[in-house]
Image: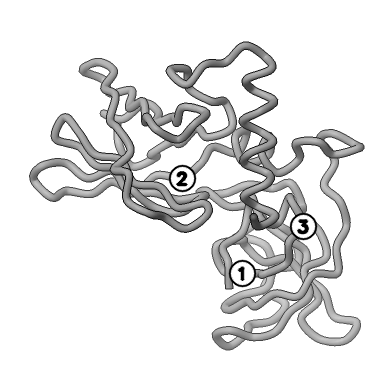
Amino acid sequence: MGRFARILTVTAAALVGLGATPATASPGFDFVCPASTDIKQISFSEDWQTAFVDLASGPVEIAATGRPLQVGEFEFEGSGLSFRGFLPEGTLFRESGQGTQCHQSKESQQALALYGNDAPGIWPAHRAAGKGSANIRAKPDATSKRVASLPMQSDVTILRNSGAFSDGFFWFEIEYAPGKTGFMWGALLCTDDEAQDLQATLRRC
């Protein structure tokens, strides 16, 4: 079992201990869909067998397809809806084929990433190998001064999670050349490091 799989298992076990049931949405897997006014929230049951889609017209439950999936991958279908993706992102599809992009909420990602941390709420420091592309900023903000620009799949070192969050991803401080650091939006980064908080907030390379 991989490190991220163990994280998910331990988190689910903790929720069971707190009285959650398989029919109850887990606070660790809450998704929001910023571009939609119809979808209020999407949540998973702790056993990943049910997705609860909170629509403006009323709540809908859809079941897992049962297809073999990779760790962190999900796929639900029912009631004219399907929701599938890979943490921390997913797409909700209607019968018409229209898709709406969704991502885990900041609170959901943070709760999952920092579960069991000795210093809850504090992101640990890293020297984790990763790959990045596009702009590096002086501060964790898209409007901040650009300090460098990287080609696709450039090798970087991920130093820490800044805690700043935008459009589904946190901003990370990285070292992109010896002694040169800056901030990159998490959607432009990936890593294979097994640190719990990175596994829960960044894509796999």
Which one is in front, 181 or 54? 54
Residue bearing the label numbered 2: 103
Q: Is mark 3 on a helix, strand or loop?
A: loop
Report the Cα–Cα distance between label 2 and label 1. Answer: 16 Å
Task: Give the crowd class for mark 3: few <14, some 14-19, many >=20 residues within 10 Å.
Answer: some
Sequence-wise first label, 1 or 3: 1
Residue at the left extreme? 96
User: Eyeballing the image, is 169 above or below 191?
Assistant: above
The count of marks equals 3
Residue bearing the label numbered 1: 190
Q: Which residue is drawn at 62% across and 11% down?
A: 19
Q: In which quarter of the image is the N terminus?
A: bottom right
Report the Cα–Cα distance between label 2 and label 3. Answer: 21 Å
Q: Looking at the picture, which amino acid does disc 2 mark?
A: His
Sequence-wise first label, 2 or 3: 2
Q: Which residue is drawn at 64% across and 50% down?
A: 200
- Give me the disc on residue 195: 3
Q: Give the left or right position of residue 203, taking residue 25 as reference.
A: right
User: Eyeballing the image, is 26 above or below 92?
Assistant: above
User: Eyeballing the image, is 73 above or below 78?
Assistant: below
